[in-house]
Amino acid sequence: MTDPRARQSELLDIFDTYIDAGLKLDLTRGKPAAEQLDLSNDLDGILEGFYLLQGGTDVRNYGGILGIPEARQLGAEFMEQNPSK
């Protein structure tokens, strides 16, 4: 049987390897890749091929956990609310 402290140390070393790699992973469930989003390009209307939000997010996607920031801002203005809440 492996010593729990030794195993913890081993796992922390592996974890540090990933941290040191500086990866920028988005593990959001169900978020399609750009290639998948490109399948809808022929349906484009007024966007004329420009699909990026101000923060660089592809607008054809779901947005972040709080949705699309520009949409939140617009809605907040109509409802006289703070978009960060």
Image (cartoon, helix red, strand yellow):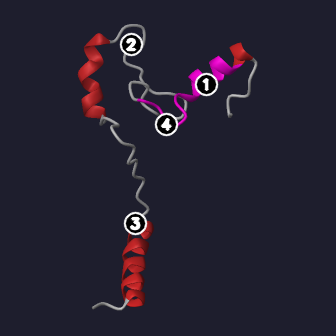
Residue 37 image point, x, y percent? 30, 27
Element type at marker 4?
Answer: loop
Q: Where is mark 2, residue-wise?
A: 48
Q: Where is mark 1, residue-wise?
A: 72
Q: How far apart are the two marked residues, 4 and 3, measured between alpha carbons? A: 23 Å
Q: Any magenta on residue 71?
A: yes
Q: Which residues are magenta?
A: 62-76
Q: Quadrant of the C terminus?
A: top right
Q: Mark 2 vs mark 1: which is more N-terminal?
A: 2
Residue at x-position 55% and y-position 34%: 66
Check disc 3 and give the amino acid type: Ala
Check disc 2 and give the amino acid type: Glu
Q: How far apart are the two marked residues, 3 and 2, measured between alpha carbons? A: 37 Å
Q: Where is mark 3, residue-wise?
A: 21
Seen as rendered, the residue at the extreme right is: 80
Residue at x-position 39% and y-position 67%: 18
Mark 2 is surrounded, within 10 Å at the Cα level, by few (under 14), some (14 to 19) or many (20 or more) other residues, namely: few
Element type at marker 1?
Answer: helix
Residue at x-position 49% and y-position 36%: 64
Viewer-nearest of labels 1 and 3? 1
Residue 56 image point, x, y percent? 48, 34
Check disc 4 and give the amino acid type: Gly
